[in-house]
Amino acid sequence: MRFSRDRTAWIYALAGSGLLLILSACASFDKPKPEPLEANPATMAVKEVWRVNVGEGAMPLELRMVGDMLWAASSQGDLSLIDATNGQVKVRSMVGKSLSAGVGADKEFVAVVSRDNQLIVWSGNKELWREKIPSLVVTAPFVAGARVFVLAADRTVYAFDAANGRKLWAQQRSGDSLLLAQASVLTAVGDTLLTAQGGRLLALNPLNGTLRWDVQVAAGRGINEVERLADLVSGVSRVGESLCLRAFQYAVTCIQTQTGRSAWNKSASGVTGIGGNSQSIVGTESDGKVIAWRRIDGEKLWTYEKLRLRSLTGPTLAGGAVVTGDGDGNVHWLSPTDGKLLNRIATDGSPILGSPLWVASTWVVMTQRGNVIGFRPQ
C-alpha cells in the first residue's frame, strides 16, 4: 500500500468522552506525479539572509509572530524565540513534552499544548502553570489581554487567566460526530474573540464567552458524514473590518467583523489557510492550483496551475509577491498581478510547514527538518 505525498488532514470520530482516529482525509493511492517545475525566471531578486534550526517539526505546528520576534516550536517540545531581523535566537526553552499544537504568545506569556492535552504556559523563560484539557487540541492557543484561549478539537472554547491558570469560562456548541484534526480559526478583532465551530464563525465576548454573532460559512453536503464535514481552517486575512478565511474543501469567504455579514462566498476545494491584502485574496487548492480573488466582491483574478500536485502550503501576500512552499522544500514567489512565477529557492528538501510569514521585511518559512529560514527582497 502506497500513499501520495499530499498533506494529510486527519478526521476524528467522537466516541463517548474520547476521540478515535478513523481515516486520513487527503491521503490517496498512487496519485499522478507532478510535472517538472518550470524554468526559474528569477525576475524578482530574493536572497536567504538567515537560517536557524529549532528541532524537527510536524503539522500542525506553526510559527507565532510577536512584533519583530518569532516563536517556533518543535514536535519534541523545544521552544525558540527568534529575532526576525537577523535570525538570532534570543530564548531557548524545553517544555519536556511532545506538542500537538503550535505556539500562542504575546509579549509576556507563551502557551503550548502537549500531546497528552496539557496546556502549558510560560513567562520570562519560566513555567507558570499547567492545565489538563479534556479533549485533543491541534489549534495553537491564542494569548491576549492576560488571557489564554484554547480551541479543542471537540469545538469547546476555553478561557484561562494567563497568570495563574484559573479557568474563566468554557463555550461548547458541538453535536457533530466527525471532527477535523487540523488547526482552526482562533483570533481576535478589537475586543471580540473569533473562533470556529464546524462551518460557522463565532464572535465571542472574551470576558465571559457570550455569543455576539455567528455566521455560517459552509454547510456540510454529501451522502455520508465524511463528505458533510465542514470546518474552518487556520490562516486568515484581515484588513480593517474585513476578515477572509477558508472552509475546508468547501469555500473561501470574506466577512464584515462588526456585524458578521458575509460579503461574498466562493466555492473552493483547498484545505489550507489563505493570504491577502487590501485588494486581493489568494489561496492554494488541494490539487496545487494557486487562485487569486478580488477582495471586495470575490471575482476571480487569476489562476496559476504549474505547481499542481506539489502539496502546497497556504500562501502569504506581502512584500510585493504571493509566496507559498511545497512538499519538496521549495519556496515559490508569484506575481500578485497575474500569478506568474517570479522566483523559486530550494531549502533543505523537506516539506515547508504552515504558511510563510512576512515579518521585519522578511519572508520566513519553517521546514519539517526544523530549519526556520528568512528571505528578503534585494
Image: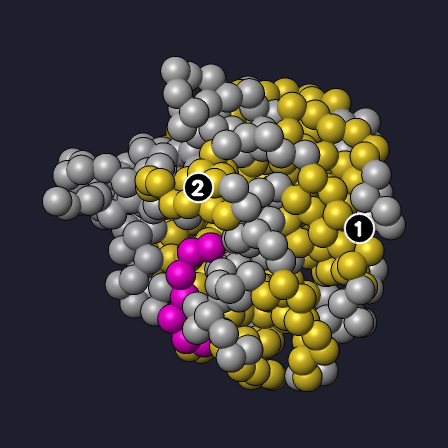
Q: Position of residue 42 (x, y in %)?
A: 34, 53
Instruction: Determine the residue positioned at 53% across, 34% down.
Output: 231
Is residue 344 something that shows in the picture?
no
Q: Is residue 342 magenta?
A: no
Q: Which residues are magenta?
A: 54-60
Judge by depth and name the residue closer to the eye, 135 or 98: 135
Instruction: Determine the residue positioned at 80% across, 72% down.
Output: 163
Quarter that holds the N terminus:
top left
Numbered mark located on residue 169 in the image: 1
Helix, strand or loop at mark 2: strand
Q: How many marks?
A: 2
Q: Specify few, some or many for label 1: CA neighbours under 10 Å numbering under 14, 14-19, or 20 or more.
A: some
Whether residue 63 is situated above or below residue 323 in the rendered picture: below
Instruction: Report which residue position mark 2 lands on.
Output: 12
Helix, strand or loop at mark 1: strand
Q: Position of residue 148 (x, y in %)?
A: 73, 60
Provide the major secondary structure of the magenta segment.
Answer: loop
Instruction: Determine the residue positioned at 42% across, 45% down.
Output: 20
Q: Position of residue 176 (x, y in %)?
A: 55, 30
Tell me where residue 28 sits by quadrant: top left
Q: Is residue 57 magenta?
A: yes
